[in-house]
Amino acid sequence: MSTRTFRFRAECVIDVITWLMLCDELDPPFTYRITKADTMRADVDVEYTTDVAQGLVHAMRSVADGQMMIETHALAEKYTGERDSRLSERYPAEEPVVLPDLIRQQLEEDFVDSSDAEGGPVLS
């Protein structure tokens, strides 16, 4: 199998963190980086590299707002960030995983604390 790079857009950093927690349970070999995240609640662009993408895409089905992740998922060289609703029909949502409020609050505080002097988040 060859290693390939994919990109997707998520509704917020919490969705990406939830996805990462689910992927950790799957234990596929992959690396990722958040390429754009202006605030905790703004759209986030993510890029990841793997040779086993299928399980990572399936994990998006269990993220509460994972439909955006699925609908924008593409090979990095073909990524546009535009949504394609046909993709969410191929990967229907499952019971969403919701982070407990205390974990969500701590993540939001950590995100704010990691901002640099100009106020931008430090994520990658």
Image (cartoon, helix red, strand yellow):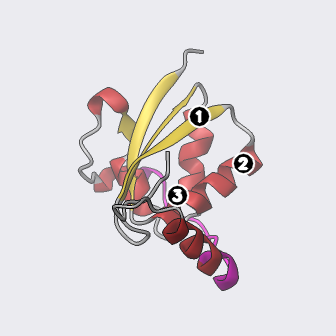
Q: What residue did someone put label 3 on?
A: 16
Picture quadrant where residue 101 is located: bottom right
Using the image, determine if residue 4 lies above or below residue 84. above
Q: What residue did someone put label 1 on?
A: 31
**Percent from the top left, x then y, of residue 84?**
28, 51
Q: What residue did someone put label 2 on?
A: 24
Q: Residue at 49% across / 70% down in the picture?
A: 112
Number of the label disc, if any, that sits on residue 12? none
Mark 1 or mark 2: which is in front? Answer: 1
For label 1, the crowd category at 10 Å Cα-Cα, with few meaning under 14, some 14 to 19 and many 20 or more, is few
Q: Is residue 94 magenta?
A: yes
Foreground residue among 45 and 106: 106
Residue 6 in the figure: left or right of residue 57: left
**Quick one: quadrant of the N terminus?**
top right
Q: Residue at 43% across / 59% down in the picture?
A: 116
Q: CA distance from mark 3 to mark 2?
A: 12 Å
Q: Residue furthest bottom?
A: 101
Q: Is residue 96 magenta?
A: yes
Residue 41 in the figure: left or right of residue 21: left
Q: Secondary structure at mark 1?
A: strand
Q: Is residue 89 visible?
A: no
For label 3, the crowd category at 10 Å Cα-Cα, with few meaning under 14, some 14 to 19 and many 20 or more, is many
**Percent from the top left, x then y, of residue 75?**
38, 31
Foreground residue among 94 and 106: 106
Q: Residue furthest top?
A: 2
